[in-house]
Image (tube, rainbow, N blue to C red):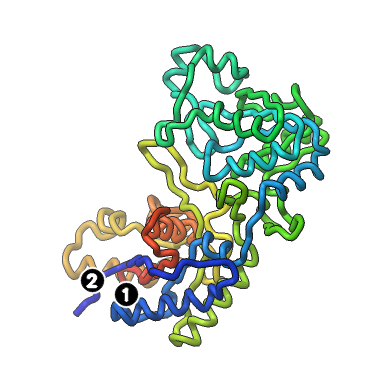
Amino acid sequence: MERMIGTVSRGVRAPIIREGDPLAEIVVDSVVKACASEHIPLSDRDIVAVTEAVVARAQGNYASIDDIAADVRAKFGGKTVGVIFPILSRNRFSVCLKGIARGAEKIVLMLSYPSDEVGNHLIDLDLLDEKGINPYTDVLTEAQYRELFGRVLHPFTGVDYLEFYSQLIREQDCEVEIILSNDPKTILNYTDHVLTCDIHSRARTKRILKKAGASVVYNLEDIMTASVNGSGYNPSYGLLGSNKATEETIKLFPRDCDAFVADVAARMKDATGKNIEVMIYGDGAFKDPIGKIWELADPVVSPGYTPGLEGQPNEVKLKYLADNDFADLSGDALKEAISNYIRNKDNDLKGQMVSQGTTPRRLTDLIGSLCDLTSGSGDKGTPIILIQGYFDNYTK
């Protein structure tokens, strides 16, 4: 019988991972056992993906507030630091902010508005229009913000982030001043020592500030790039991609990811005889249409993957073929014509009408997003994802 199932994504349960656990061995053992229990045959180019959280946990890649404070103090001199464009997140940024404040005498906190970089709103856009505020040009002090908008609570968390971040900073015996602006150069009216906290626009922000005369500019990716007093670190991403572990510690983005995925792939080959693709995934790259929040708070979707996951899909749009090239065909004749077209398609369809509407994104971003949606962020207990049939098409 003709195979009727295409891509399948499954969450694989695993033990709770602790620091020092042999994660590559655990991943392979969990996948092999899951396949045996569910009678799932593996094939070449199936994908095993592991969430970045358990990779970092197994590595013990943690840092404390004091570690962050020491690095900030060393880089900025312990005086006034302009902290600009952080995301509004208790999980992602609050503990980092504690460490930054502990390493400074004063923080000038500059927030973007009406929302942060990933879509967490401080102010409703319609309310901005009503008040006659132009977010591209207007700079607001905290007092002006309060006078115009009052106390605004995040719709999902119920947190007033100006109040929350201000309190966190003061609790570290650090003075705080809050302003709202979308122009990086605004911060230079307050200090020329700047820590940029944006994620995906960080290179541009640093470039603008340096050109405008800032004397010291770092991004979160530059903090905790090396061990401080034996702490964890990430040489590529620093504090970017970190999560709250406890009130005093963060879990950093995992490091040495290429070595890990190569190890898992080799072990899967030994255990199953199949050439399995392997990747580490973090946040998916998608946007919530209701809350307007873009999920991707990590610097990349996948910090490590095997070479077979490099590149973008090279796909044709079936409905385009059906409505245009083969509009006069139906049934088996249409199926055979489309199948032959796919078998003989160009190796690079970029710019061709037949590929319009297909997703022009990297494979790792697409697959990582699928993994993030499959595993969720709560209590499913499936930090490993098995994806099958992803590289199949209509002809297979």
Q: Circle 2 sits on which residue?
A: 4
**What's under tag 2, amino acid-wise?**
Met
The quarter of the rendered structure image containing the C terminus is bottom left
Residue 188, given in percent of the width and then of the height, sits at: 75, 26
Q: Which image quarter: residue 14? A: bottom left
SS label for mark 2: loop
The residue at the point 56 percent across, 38 percent down is 87
Few, some or many residues within 10 Å of mark 1 (<14, 14–19, 20+)? few
Eyeballing the image, is 48 above or below 294? below
SS label for mark 1: loop
Few, some or many residues within 10 Å of mark 2 (<14, 14–19, 20+)? few
Q: Which image quarter: residue 395? A: bottom left
**What's under tag 1, amino acid-wise?**
Lys
Residue 279, given in percent of the width and then of the height, sits at: 51, 67
Mark 1 to mark 2: distance in Å?
10 Å
**Residue with the most extreme left position:** 331
Q: Is residue 66 toward the left or the right of residue 87 in the image?
A: right
Residue 311, given in percent of the width and then of the height, sits at: 53, 63
The residue nearer to you, when weighing 361 against 370, is: 370
The residue at the point 46 percent across, 59 percent down is 368
Residue 345, given in percent of the width and then of the height, sits at: 41, 67
Eyeballing the image, is 26 above or below 362? below
Q: Is residue 187 toward the left or the right of residue 325 in the image?
A: right
Eyeballing the image, is 13 above or below 38? above
The residue nearer to you, when weighing 83 against 340, is: 83
What's the mark number on residue 281?
A: none
The residue at the point 35 percent across, 78 percent down is 35
Q: Circle 1 sits on which residue?
A: 396
The quarter of the rendered structure image containing the N terminus is bottom left
